[in-house]
Amino acid sequence: MAIFEPSQRQNREAPPLPELGGIEYPRAAMWASGNLNNVLNDDKGRQLFRCFLFQSLADENLSFIEATDKLKKMKSSDEKKAFAKEIISLYSPYINLSSGAMKKIREAAESENFDPEDFNPAIKEVRRLLENDQFPRFRRSEIYLDFLEQLLPRAYAEKWATSFEALLGNHVGRHHFRIFLRGIHAEENLRFWEAVVEFRAVKNKSPAMVNLARVIMQTYLAEGASNEVFLPFGVRQVIQKRLDENDIDLVLFDDAIKHVEQVLSNH
């Protein structure tokens, strides 16, 4: 049965959510600031990510990674080869591989001297998809934020009433603040704030920083942008001048952020 066919998914039982016992808030909160490996190496994190992927109709990617892990641990050559063919039969119609990677694993499974390492290009491509597409969405997902909220100590939430920094610095607090801002049509301010946090995490004065600065300008500060953040004219003018002169560093958006944080804290 093609278990990953959309028509079959409704007949499959959703994976169970991880139990709340045996885990505290800081451990689960680290999944949002870490990388994919941090989640996959945590049994509860992996299970929650699996639940997210199931909801997103993308759980075949994690299942493929797990199957190839199992393949590499097998001892018998005949067993490895048979299982490799099973993996290809089950997953090849559903995972998004380049033609080169797909060709390599198909040829490997038919080779007289089967080598599981020939699956590495395919594994790399699937992991890249998980890391760059599905994992970022997982960190913003309702399923993750709901799980976090159930673990949230009351003391954390109590700080939100007196500390704007505590509110924005907490994943659950920021989630609820986002919903509030969306209701008053002001979410673009928080999105801009998050974009600048990402900007500041990039290597200073690197090409990546330059590119991201221009994206932020076009997305949030350009006149008429759909997510335009309203800044004092002088602040916007200084940023544009520095962009025109390619004078881009970590402090480029500092004055803009001060203004936006003031706006957000007044809501």
Image: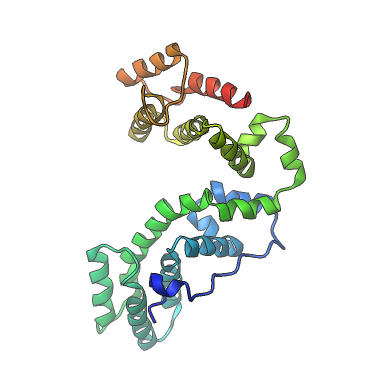
Asked if residue 140 lies left or right of residue 202, the reply is right
Question: Compared to 26, does 174 lie above or below?
Answer: above
**Which residue lies at the image location 65% right of the left edge and 35% below the top edge?**
167
Q: How many marks?
A: 0
Q: Quadrant of the N terminus?
A: bottom left
- The image shows residue 108, relative to residue 264, as above or below, that is below
Q: Position of residue 193 (x, y in %)?
A: 51, 31
243 vs 233, nearest the viewer: 233
- Quadrant of the rendered structure where residue 87 is? bottom left
Residue 28 visible in this rendered orientation of the protein: no
The quadrant of the rendering that contains the C terminus is: top right
Nearest to the observer: residue 253 or residue 73:
253
Residue in view at x 35 percent, y 88 percent = 78
**How has the structure been colored for display?**
rainbow
Observer able to see residue 179: yes
Nearer the observer, 239 or 201: 239
Displayed quadrant of residue 208: top left
Residue 217 locus on image (x, y percent): 38, 26
Residue at (54%, 70%) from the top-left corner?
A: 14
Percent position of residue 128, x then y: 38, 56
Residue 165: where, in percent of width, then height? 64, 31
Which residue shows up at 69% across the image and 61% down it?
A: 20
Q: Is residue 101 left or right of residue 206?
A: left
